[in-house]
Amino acid sequence: MRVVLGVAGGIAAYKAASLLRLLREAGHAVRVVPTSSALRFVGAPTWEALSGEPVTADLFDDVENVAHVEVARTADLVVVAPATADLLARAASGRADDLLTATLLTATCPVLMAPAMHTQMWQHPATVANVATLRARGVHVLDPDDGRLTGTDSGPGRLPEPAAIVAAALALVAPGDLAGRRVVISAGGTQEPVDPVRFLGNRSTGRQGVALALAARDRGASVVLVAANVTVPVPDGIEVREVGTASQLREAMTIAAADADVVVMAAAVADFRPADPAGTKIKKTPSQAPPVIELVENPDVLAGLAAHRARPGQVVVGFAAETGDEHGSVLDHGRAKALRKGADLLVVNRVDDGRGFGTPDNEVTVLDAAGQVVAEATGSKDSVAHTVWDAVVALLRRS
Ligand code: CTP
């Protein structure tokens, strides 16, 4: 496939080099079309060396071949990353004052834009209106990530991860391998009330579950996310059902699983809950010993869903956050859990040494129901999510 990679003039222009590499590694020919300000961040020789194709920003180079018409006519996909506030404005108003904007006006293939800018620029009514105009015209404009920006500030405006941009872009041209599939994913961590102000909880933010939801959406699935106290933003196009406790999560998952092709339990579910949560705030009484909180066991949602499949051929996926200990390695514990839970796939997630919780990266091994390794992945939670879906798709094809 021929991809035009438009690069606008923002500091995130350097990240487009990773994007270019990912596209090339996936076997696509890439023509980079920077704006002249993008060339002040990353020069033409870099783009030429990485793409193996000539690079120009100007309409007046290569005039004899009418470059903007030629570049657009031969493209199967246009990706603009980063799309700055200025580029979005020029594209929305139909300007054609450089090769990139002229190409955007002549392209008939799918166009994806990945914005990156400061939060104030992204949230400015002018940018909001420009994005709405572009989306109404069928341009796919991604929401930027929320995170660290150029300076010390942070907020929405970060360029999404290159792997996520590639996945979203490729999903526009190829019907996703989850097209027509319904998936339900639990994410986050349950909170079990002790009294009206306190709860037993865990450190899960929901980031991996949200990454799974996003990857499934980009691969064409319709996605329900059962969100237990998720603290990261959930992208558009995902139906969210909020829950708090393990029993609420079980109920929501059971309802959503009834017509799902795939069920993924990425949430950290509390194994125990206070037997009798206090109706009023527990006070300390100086003359009395601290209260003893009696716990009862919560149902194992994953084992229940795996044992009572709502539909034949439904694929059930579990996660196992493990640390190695004197009884065995991370993988030993994972294998035992795979056999115990009855899921088709168990994604074993290393959580020792601060790995796993609230971090962008993850390190996982995917086991089948018999505990055999079917895949391994280390990297961003987005790329881990795609590894998990690759394994799911392989199972769906077999059933
Ligand atoms: N899980 C669940 N219901 C529970 C506990 C866990 O559905 N009450 C699911 C999790 O969503 C995850 C998988 O089971 O997909 C493994 O969770 P984990 O906490 O690693 O396993 P536990 O069964 O709780 O085992 P242990 O804590 O003893 O390691």
Image (spheres, rainbow, N blue to C red):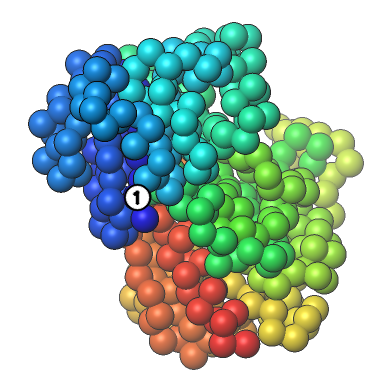
Answer with the quarter of the image where residue 265 lies.
bottom right
**Residue 203, image x and y in percent?**
53, 47
**Residue 52, image x and y in percent?**
15, 45
Q: Is residue 247 above or below residue 146?
A: below
Residue 340 seen in this snapshot? no
Q: Nearer the viewer, residue 109 or 320?
A: 109
Left or right: where does residue 373 sit relative to residue 185? Answer: left
Q: Nearer the viewer, residue 140 or 398?
A: 140
Q: Residue at x 42, y 59 (%)?
A: 384
Which residue, given by chain and number where applicable, does mark 1 sit on?
Answer: 2
Q: Nearer the viewer, residue 29 or 304?
A: 29
Q: Residue at x 51, y 59 (%)?
A: 174
**Residue 163, image x and y in percent?**
38, 48
- Looking at the image, how many numbered discs can be counted on the residues? 1
Quarter of the picture containing the C terminus is: bottom right
Left or right: where does residue 236 sit relative to residue 277? Answer: left
Amino acid type at mark 1: Arg
Residue 187 seen in this snapshot? yes
Quarter of the picture containing the N terminus is: bottom left
Q: Is residue 341 above or below residue 387?
A: below
Q: Residue at x 49, y 83 (%)?
A: 368
**Residue 54, image x and y in percent?**
17, 36
